[in-house]
Amino acid sequence: SPTEKQSLSLRPVTADTVREICALSDTLPEAQHRFVADNAVSMAQAYFEPKAWFRAIYFGDKPVGFVMLYDDDEKQEYFLWRLMIAGPHQGRGYGRGVIELLLDYVRTRPGATALLTSFVPDEGGPGKFYRRLGFTPTGEILEGETVVRLDL
C-alpha cells in the first residue's frame, strides 16, 4: 500500500548496523534458507563485486530485510540479486514495497528498460511473488534458476 511504501526505506548498511542486518537471516523459516543466501554471505559477495549495490530495508526505524542489485550502468543491465524479508515481517507487503522502491531507483540508472531477477523454481519459493508483481519468464535458466523480467 502507499502508506507502507512511504514508511519503507532502503538505507546503506553501516558499521553500526551490519550485525543486526546479518542477524535478520536467522529469522527466516527453515524451508526458506535454500531460496536466499544469508545476508552476511551477500555482503561478502558484494565486497568483491564492484557492481553490487546493496541496502538494508527498514520499516520506520526497524530493519526488516536486505536487498542487493547487480547495477551495471555500462551494459545497462539491472538484476535483483538478493531480496530477503525477515521471517517475522513477511506477509505485510514489504516485499512489494521494496520492489517499488527498487524500480524507482533503477529508473534513474542509465539506459534502464527492465529489472531482471531469478529464483529457484521450487514449491515454496518466490516465483508466485514475482509473477504477481508482473515479472515474466525470459526463457533463460541461470545456475538452475528461472530468470524473469519486469519492463519499466
Image: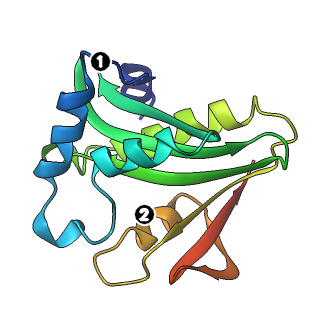
Q: Point out residue 118 in the picture as x, y percentages from the top left corner.
A: 54, 68
**How many labels sit on residues?**
2
Q: State which mark lies toward you, 1 or 2.
A: 1
Q: Mark 2 is on which residue type?
A: Phe
Q: Residue at x 68, y 81 (%)?
A: 140
Q: Residue at x 23, y 49 (%)?
A: 90
Q: Which residue is mark 1?
A: 15
Q: Earlier in the sequence, mark 1 or mark 2?
A: 1
33 on left or right of 26: right
Residue nearest the viewer, comparing 60 with 12: 12
Q: Point out residue 151 in the picture as x, y percentages from the top left corner.
A: 75, 55
Could you give the CA–CA distance between mark 1 and mark 2, rounded to whole angstroms? 32 Å
Residue 147: image quadrant is bottom right
Residue 63: image quadrant is top left
Q: Which residue is mark 2?
A: 129
* SS assignment at label 2: helix
Give me the disc on residue 32: none
Q: Relative to 32, does residue 141 appear above or below in the rendering?
A: below
Dot 1, crowdedness within 10 Å: few (<14), some or many (≥20)? few
